[in-house]
Image (cartoon, grey):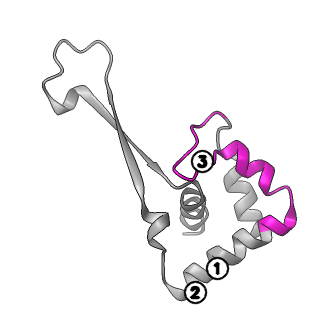
Amino acid sequence: MKEEFVGAIEKCNNSSTPRLDKLSWRHLKKIIRDTAYLNKLVDIANKYINLEHWPLHLKTSTTIVIPKPNKEFYDSPKAYQPIVLLNMIDKLFEKVISEKM
Protein backbone atom coordinates (compact mmCIF):
# COMPACT_ATOMS: atom_id res chain seq x y z
CA MET A 1 0.00 0.00 0.00
CA LYS A 2 3.00 2.30 0.41
CA GLU A 3 3.42 2.42 -3.35
CA GLU A 4 -0.18 3.65 -3.72
CA PHE A 5 0.47 6.49 -1.27
CA VAL A 6 3.68 7.55 -2.99
CA GLY A 7 2.05 7.30 -6.42
CA ALA A 8 -0.99 9.33 -5.36
CA ILE A 9 1.13 12.09 -3.83
CA GLU A 10 3.61 12.26 -6.71
CA LYS A 11 0.77 12.98 -9.17
CA CYS A 12 -0.30 16.06 -7.23
CA ASN A 13 0.64 19.65 -7.99
CA ASN A 14 3.22 21.25 -5.68
CA SER A 15 1.63 24.69 -6.03
CA SER A 16 -1.67 23.72 -4.38
CA THR A 17 -3.00 25.84 -1.56
CA PRO A 18 -2.44 24.56 1.97
CA ARG A 19 -5.59 23.04 3.42
CA LEU A 20 -7.33 23.20 6.79
CA ASP A 21 -4.52 21.21 8.38
CA LYS A 22 -2.00 23.73 6.95
CA LEU A 23 -0.44 21.07 4.71
CA SER A 24 0.07 21.12 0.96
CA TRP A 25 1.10 18.36 -1.46
CA ARG A 26 4.62 19.80 -1.39
CA HIS A 27 4.72 19.25 2.38
CA LEU A 28 3.42 15.70 2.11
CA LYS A 29 5.96 14.85 -0.58
CA LYS A 30 8.73 15.85 1.82
CA ILE A 31 7.15 14.03 4.76
CA ILE A 32 6.82 10.67 2.99
CA ARG A 33 10.51 10.62 2.06
CA ASP A 34 10.97 9.40 5.62
CA THR A 35 9.71 5.81 5.57
CA ALA A 36 8.75 5.98 9.26
CA TYR A 37 6.20 8.73 8.47
CA LEU A 38 5.00 6.92 5.36
CA ASN A 39 4.48 3.75 7.41
CA LYS A 40 2.49 5.72 10.01
CA LEU A 41 0.21 7.20 7.33
CA VAL A 42 -0.41 3.76 5.84
CA ASP A 43 -1.10 2.30 9.31
CA ILE A 44 -3.57 5.07 10.11
CA ALA A 45 -5.41 4.62 6.81
CA ASN A 46 -5.58 0.85 7.30
CA LYS A 47 -6.97 1.28 10.83
CA TYR A 48 -9.68 3.66 9.60
CA ILE A 49 -10.65 1.21 6.88
CA ASN A 50 -10.58 -1.86 9.16
CA LEU A 51 -12.60 -0.11 11.87
CA GLU A 52 -14.97 1.29 9.22
CA HIS A 53 -14.70 4.63 10.99
CA TRP A 54 -13.72 7.99 9.53
CA PRO A 55 -12.93 10.61 12.21
CA LEU A 56 -14.96 13.81 12.13
CA HIS A 57 -11.89 16.06 11.91
CA LEU A 58 -11.07 14.47 8.54
CA LYS A 59 -14.59 15.17 7.26
CA THR A 60 -14.40 18.88 8.03
CA SER A 61 -14.23 21.22 5.05
CA THR A 62 -14.26 24.91 4.29
CA THR A 63 -15.95 26.38 1.25
CA ILE A 64 -14.54 29.47 -0.38
CA VAL A 65 -16.76 31.28 -2.87
CA ILE A 66 -14.96 33.11 -5.65
CA PRO A 67 -16.69 35.43 -8.14
CA LYS A 68 -16.27 34.28 -11.74
CA PRO A 69 -14.50 36.85 -13.90
CA ASN A 70 -16.23 38.95 -16.57
CA LYS A 71 -19.78 38.50 -15.31
CA GLU A 72 -22.13 41.38 -15.99
CA PHE A 73 -24.15 40.78 -12.83
CA TYR A 74 -23.27 39.06 -9.59
CA ASP A 75 -26.84 38.63 -8.33
CA SER A 76 -27.03 34.95 -9.36
CA PRO A 77 -25.35 31.94 -7.75
CA LYS A 78 -24.07 30.95 -11.22
CA ALA A 79 -21.79 33.99 -11.11
CA TYR A 80 -19.71 32.37 -8.37
CA GLN A 81 -17.42 29.34 -8.15
CA PRO A 82 -17.38 27.48 -4.84
CA ILE A 83 -14.15 25.73 -3.91
CA VAL A 84 -14.17 23.14 -1.15
CA LEU A 85 -10.99 22.73 0.89
CA LEU A 86 -10.68 19.42 2.71
CA ASN A 87 -8.12 18.26 5.21
CA MET A 88 -5.03 17.30 3.16
CA ILE A 89 -4.56 13.93 4.89
CA ASP A 90 -8.18 13.08 4.13
CA LYS A 91 -7.67 14.11 0.51
CA LEU A 92 -4.66 11.78 0.32
CA PHE A 93 -6.60 8.87 1.82
CA GLU A 94 -9.45 9.51 -0.66
CA LYS A 95 -7.04 9.45 -3.60
CA VAL A 96 -5.45 6.18 -2.51
CA ILE A 97 -8.81 4.50 -1.85
CA SER A 98 -10.37 5.71 -5.12
CA GLU A 99 -7.40 4.42 -7.16
CA LYS A 100 -7.79 0.97 -5.57
CA MET A 101 -11.44 0.73 -6.65
Q: 81 or 61: nearer the eye? A: 61
Magenta span includes 27: yes
Task: Look at mark 2 in the image and give the residue it sits on.
Answer: 50
Are the residues at dot 2 and dot 1 in contact (C-beta closer than 8 Å)? yes
Q: Quadrant of residue 80?
A: top left
**Magenta segment boundaries in residue numbering:** 15-38
Direction from residue 53 to residue 45 in the image, left or right: right
The amino acid sitting under disc 3 is: Lys
Q: Earlier in the sequence, mark 3 or mark 1?
A: 3
> Mark 3 against mark 2, which lies toward the viewer?
3
- Residue 46, numbered circle: 1
Label 3: state its secondary structure: loop
The x and y percentages for residue 92 are: 60, 58
Q: CA distance from mark 2 to mark 1?
A: 6 Å
Residue count near mark 1 (Cα–Cα under 10 Å), binned few <14, some 14–19, many ≥20 = some
Direction from residue 64 to residue 72 in the image, left or right: left
Label 2: state its secondary structure: helix
Direction from residue 100 to residue 86 in the image, left or right: left
Q: Quadrant of the N terminus?
A: bottom right
The x and y percentages for residue 34 are: 86, 60
Q: CA distance from mark 3 to mark 2?
A: 27 Å
Label 1: state its secondary structure: helix
Task: Look at mark 3 in the image and give the residue it sits on.
Answer: 22
